[in-house]
Amino acid sequence: MFRPAREPQSKRHVRSSYYVVGEGVLADSRDEDPAEPLAASTVEALRKFQFSRLGPQAKPERQLDRPARTELAQAMTDATRTQPDSGNPKVPAGFTYLGQFVDHDLTLDATAAQLEDDITVRQLLQGRSPALDLDSLYGLGPDHRFDQRFYEPDGIHLRTGTTQGIPNATDITAQPLVGFDLPRVGVGSLKSERRRPLIPDPRNDENLAVAQIHCAFIRFHNRLASDLAEKGVSSAVLFESAREAVVKHYQWMLRTDFLPRIVDETIVKEVFTKGRKVVDPSPGEHDFPTMPIEFSVAAYRLGHSMVRGAYNWNRIFDNGAGTLRLLFQFTGTSGILSPPPDSPDNPEAGSFEHLPTNWIADFRRLFDFREAGRDDLGVTDAQFNIAKRIDTLLVNPLATLPLGSFGARGTTPDPVERNLAFRNLTRGNMLRLASGQQMAKHLMNRDVGVKPLNASDFDNRDGAQLSEALRKRLAADCPLWFYILREAEVNGGGRLTGVGGRIVAETFHRAMEGSRYSIVRDPFWRPFLSPVDSRRDQGVFQMTDLLLYAFEGKADLLNPLGV
């Protein structure tokens, strides 16, 4: 959602082309007409991330033109509308950015910058397959000559970064703190080069919340690797042993904690117990997963509506002072790691080259540790951050994205092109995504019980307010992304259901099945790292358990700036 010089295009959100299996290459067109597929050579097909299409194509004449997309995008980001917080259940705001971290894991092209002869065809395909295997954390591993830079010299632990103390501060913020920033390149003639994150996927430094979650995963791996070494695990297998355990705990957490918070639990349970009906339902033993464009370009963009405009970030940036714009600003990819008035649109502005210490996250405000029985790590309701409800409204700051968040620094785009809703709707047009109505009918024909939206479901309620003409148009042919958000708003109580719920649950299941390490293919595996004995005995491992393990259950690590 939320890019350093010379970065491979396939790692960016502004993907210029999609290779859709069976169709060819669909590339952006300057006149915004739907893309015409271009034939791909065998080599080109191998080198491109593998997308697929679940449903039919939309007819171009029934898609929204630019004025209609502009009107809809403005309605979705209307500054006069107040979007409610998530209701029942209330979703801690950290899950918004965990979802973004997962998106980057699913869509990372792990071989984009490494097309050397020592990558086999199988590795090439696997590196371009959507799998929940944390390749955004591990890259191609410590033995690969390009990706070994992400690791400590021992080839076991991941590199960590150090924050930059605040000049003239008189408290802990004056100190550089190890492990609370992403590792950074640190060399180069330009500040933007030195600020670049030294991680496999620079998108995880597009906003501060997802960057801090990436730091937590680095800690998670490093602590487990150290614990395994202390238990006598041979150095020859130590890294892979740690990686396997980390990946499986991560998948378990997504299956049992993350997915049920954003998708109707009935759908999640059905998919993970009875299997898939829509997303690659009967793959061959050696088939790699592909990424459904309906998931990537529509269904999984649900997280955009969960974003808050401001956060109670830590004791310093409290009472909403952690604004969304500042979460972009204090990064090395979208921002400049330096405070205003320096502008993030100038990548060489600002004086900081590491995260300022006063911007370290207070994880107690993003995830509810009381769920794990740690009342001592709870915060007041006024301090805690709840995600916005999944619906058809986005907070207004998403109407004016920073140029660095979509690779447009140095340009002057039409203002509407900075609107995230407009960008999502336009990308759906380019790929000729089926309308929501088409996808509902397609799923029903495959014996998936979905409840299609009625024309009355597009009446104005408490979501985006539509003109009568636009409402009638959407009731007949609704862009898939908006349709899925409307499903959550009308039928899902703020969680995905129907078309959107099914696409997301099945894509997650396939991505776990296709991972090198997989809880789907290893159904008897159970988590063993929960720091709470009773939860470990019950096979419980949630995001709070992951953080408690990674940060050793210590308040001064989960929140080093204090209360």
Image (cartoon, helix red, strand yellow):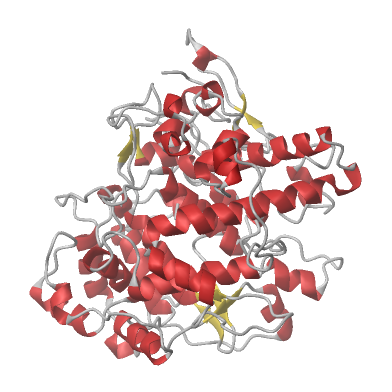
Instruction: Let me know if residue 434 appears in the view.
Output: yes
Q: Residue furthest top?
A: 170
Q: Is residue 249 left or right of residue 224?
A: left
Relative vertical location of residue 62 with respect to residue 228 in this rendering, above or below: below
Taking the spot 29% from the left edge, 89% from the top edge, the residue there is 61
Query: Is residue 191 in view?
Result: no
- Residue 370 spot, x, y in % from top left: 42, 34
State which quarter of the image contains the C terminus.
top left
Residue nearest the viewer, comparing 269 with 12: 269
Residue 186 placement (x, y as % from top left): 68, 34
What is the x, y in percent for residue 87? 26, 50
The answer to whether 363 appears left or right of 124 in the picture is: left
Residue 539 coordinates in the image, percent (x, y): 58, 50
Residue at the outermost left position? 468
- In the rendered view, tell whether residue 215 sits above or below residue 438: above
> Image quadrant for the N terminus?
bottom left
Residue depicted at x 79% and y 75%: 121
User: Would you say 546 lies left or right of 444 here?
Assistant: right
